[in-house]
Amino acid sequence: MNRHPSDPPLLTTLAGRLRRKAQEFLRVALSHYVTNGLTVSLGLVLIMLALFESAGLGAAASAAVGVIITSLPDVPSPRRRKIMQVLPAPLLGTPLFMLVQLTRQDDLLLGCVLVGGTFLAVMLMAWGKRGGPICFSLLFSMLFSMAAPPMTSLNQVLAHTGWFVAGSVLYLLWAVLTTHLLNQRYRRQLLAECLHSFAGILRTQAQRFDDEPDHQALLEAMLVQQANFADQLQDTRNVVLESPTTRPRQQVAAMLLSLLEARDHQLACDLDLDVLLDRQAIAPHLPRLQQALNATADELQALGMALLRGRRQTSIRPIPDLRPKLVGTLPPRATANPSLAPEPVRTDPPDTAALLRNMADRIGHINDEAVKIAALARGDVTPELSLVRNQWQLFVSTTQWSVKPLLGQLGWRAPTLRYALRATLAVAAGYAVALHLPWATHDYWILITIVVVMRGNLAQTVQRRNARVAGTVLGCLLVMGLLMAHPGAKVLFLIVALSTGLAHAFALRRYLYTTIAGTVTGLLQAHLMLVGLQPTFAIGERLADTLLGALLAWLFSYVLPSWERSQIPGLVKRSIQAQSQHARLALALLDTAQTADVNWRLARRDAYDSLSALTLATQRSLAEPRQVRPPLEPLEALQARSYQLLAQLTAVKSLLLLRRGQLDLAQATPALEQAARCIEAELSGQAPAASGVNSPGFSLSGQPYLARPDVLLAADLTPWLLRRLQLACAIAGELRLATSRVRV
């Protein structure tokens, strides 16, 4: 292929790619999930070696099962609630582990234990992200117990279970210890991950300033990025905002809050973007705005890497202020004359130069927050967190195990109940088939494949089915090559520990890595527990068991299905309610600004979280059969309008919090009240006329703008506020129409 003379040299291009790959590898290696996986590995190998030296191989192998099932819910979390996060796994897993041992000699009784235990375990998914790891802890307690040799006496069962409990207790203590020791490290790592994700969002936003952007593709990418970012933010809040009582903790917490503000300003960058892109006069200025977004993204990503590397404050470089460049590239503004009286709001097309400067100002705000984040990291700015310091519990997810989520999933149409029934039927079928296979089957391997492949939705089941088969092939080859070398017990301990940590680290990120490592762990763990029987390793049988288990999991995914379209109405309702609550608080103009700000931040979080849940459900529905998919076009329109409404209200809230002195409160206060009633009426489905919003002083017809933006921008921001309120009401109406079109 011929290269253009202006293209960079080939070696330069390759060097750039290698540099980016190295940076990406380093970012992953220094991430919180890899650190967490390494703590699991270290805890497992230390406990196994200690028990091996003191009680022998059998005790160490049994204790390793207790360690593995206790480690599953051990993820970065608040220190004070660590025990309640991890304790349910061994507490519920121990009885199931023992019951399997007691019924090993009776196929029927063992089948009853497996069926009942599977249903109980999967129903724990009613608690969402907290219940998932506990669910798999219970399942693995049963299935790893099946890998052990049958016990011939009650004393043997009790001894075997005792070592299982010993491993669980020792790891529970280890998890609490490492959480305290690594708490500050986890805070910085989680924040760095958020900075990296937000940098990706800024780059997607920058692409929207291209000459001919693919708006639909960029919108879809942005929705997915925002949904994943919202999920990351809550995990980060749980750790970073816990007890910000010391200077280092306050520093990281303040950086997170500035990042949240930057996210709001980024969202507001979509305001008036379509109007600006349609006007040829501003085309020369868009590349500079695009460069500013990309430059800020690069700086935030570099800051994230500095946090991951643990650099000292003085070695962290400041982020440059891009406002002078942004101002210098825009059309010159007229000199403000405060003596001139503000002209009335008009309904003509908005002034292009004013809108362009407003867009640059939003990008400038993003850069301002980035500059502040770097200054906080360097220690140049003192964090002010009086609100969060006193009310941090409001921002952290609860770890109390209330029965309410379970009760809410007991209906016949409830997705968790259907998932539990599907998984139970699949395990029962897999166990029955395993008893009648012509080869020397390992029934627990078929069942492990079923439970790790099957998920509550078809999209994840299909994804994990393919990864499970590929990972099992690679894992079997690795184990076969390893066992041919006849390694000693201590070497096997180390490999089991490393593979367990790797599987733990990438369980939610790279499932292929997890399934390869999990295969190595499962096969070697079974080898250790059966070592007295001199087992042989047959790769063909393992692969056959894996294929059979994956096939059963996939087939049973169509039994009692819980398609995403059945969940959409509830998610839409939750999102609209969160939008309404956010609008009410965003438009509130109260004297008690401190309390109002906290409540608004909580409402903003709920609005983002509910919208991200709807976005992810829509994405998962793409893997389902066409005849059961929800209507995608109105759902995408609903999500787009929701983000636009959030953007408009964020712009309004910024005016109220930062520039209240430049507002005519006599005009702004009734307009805010009327807009709040308008949005509430629209989102509740009532007729706008019933809300009384069409009163003097706040026109819903036309689009008010500044007749002389340069003058008014310096003296009175009320016309800008009125324009945002008018647009917010219009978007709320469009959001109501999009909601009515979602027929599922």
Image: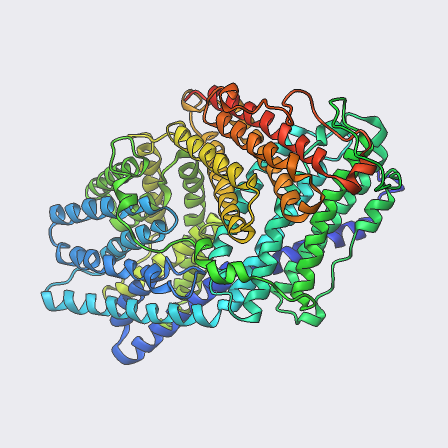
Query: Residue shown at 45%/26% (left/top)?
Result: 684
Residue 596 visible, this angle: yes
What residue is shown at x 32% (from left), y 61% (from top)?
84
Specify the quadrant of the image occupied by residue 302: bottom right
| Residue 354, position as x, y percentages in the image | 80, 34
Picture quadrant where residue 586 is located: top right
Residue shown at the point (56%, 49%) measured from the top left: 591
Q: Quadrant of the C terminus?
A: top left
**Can see residue 442?**
no
Q: Is residue 654 left or right of residue 476?
A: right
Which residue is at a point 86% across and 35% down the rendered structure image?
284
Extreme-bottom residue of the structure? 54
Q: Nearer the viewer, residue 237 or 685?
A: 685
276 horizontally vs 386: left or right: right
In the depicted structure, whether residue 304 falls above or below residue 710: below
User: How far from the left and from the top, in percent, is residue 30?
Assistant: 57, 63
Nearest to the observer: residue 546 or residue 161 = 161
Instruction: Give 349 or 479, whichever is nearer the viewer.
Output: 349
Q: Is residue 165 left or right of residue 282?
A: left
Q: Is residue 5 left or right of residue 241?
A: right
Can you give x and y, in whole percent of width and height, for residue 523 in the image?
35, 57
Q: Position of residue 282 (x, y in %)?
A: 83, 32
Badge count: 0
Locate the N terminus by quadrant.
top right
